Image: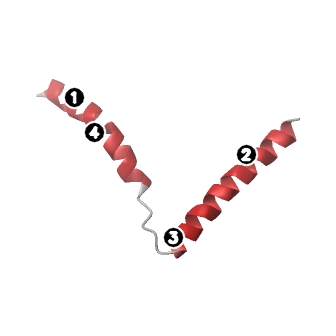
Amino acid sequence: MKSKREKRIFWSLFTVSMLIVSLKYGGVEIPNPGDGIAFLLKPFSDFLFSLLK
């Protein structure tokens, strides 16, 4: 049972990675994951910096 779940996870990640590579070679601009993380954490960091002032 465990190996079935592991195979499903492997093939899901493999499919996503192949999709990203195909889009990249197709000329589609893939955003940097760090930019998304920074966008999500910006309000929290602004709040913390306002507390420190």
Residue 22 quadrant: bottom right
* Mark drawn on residue 9: 2
Q: CA distance from mark 1 to mark 2?
A: 37 Å
Q: Earlier in the sequence, mark 1 or mark 4?
A: 4
Residue type, numbered disc 4: Lys
Residue underneath mark 1: 47
Residue type, numbered disc 2: Ile
Q: At which x and y percent is residue 28?
A: 46, 69
Crowd band around label 2 with a 10 angstrom C-alpha radius: few (<14), some (14–19), many (20+)? few
The single residue placed furthest to the top in the displayed view is 51
Q: At which x and y percent is residue 2?
A: 85, 36
Q: CA distance from mark 4 to mark 3?
A: 27 Å
Badge 2 marks a residue whose secondary structure is: helix
Badge 4 marks a residue whose secondary structure is: helix
Crowd band around label 3 with a 10 angstrom C-alpha radius: few (<14), some (14–19), many (20+)? few
Residue type, numbered disc 3: Lys
Q: At which x and y percent is residue 40?
A: 35, 39
The answer to whether 8 appears left or right of 17 in the picture is right
Q: Earlier in the sequence, mark 3 or mark 1?
A: 3
| Nearer to us: label 3 or label 2 | 3
Badge 3 marks a residue whose secondary structure is: helix
Q: CA distance from mark 3 to mark 2?
A: 23 Å
CB within 8 Å, label 1 to label 2 = no
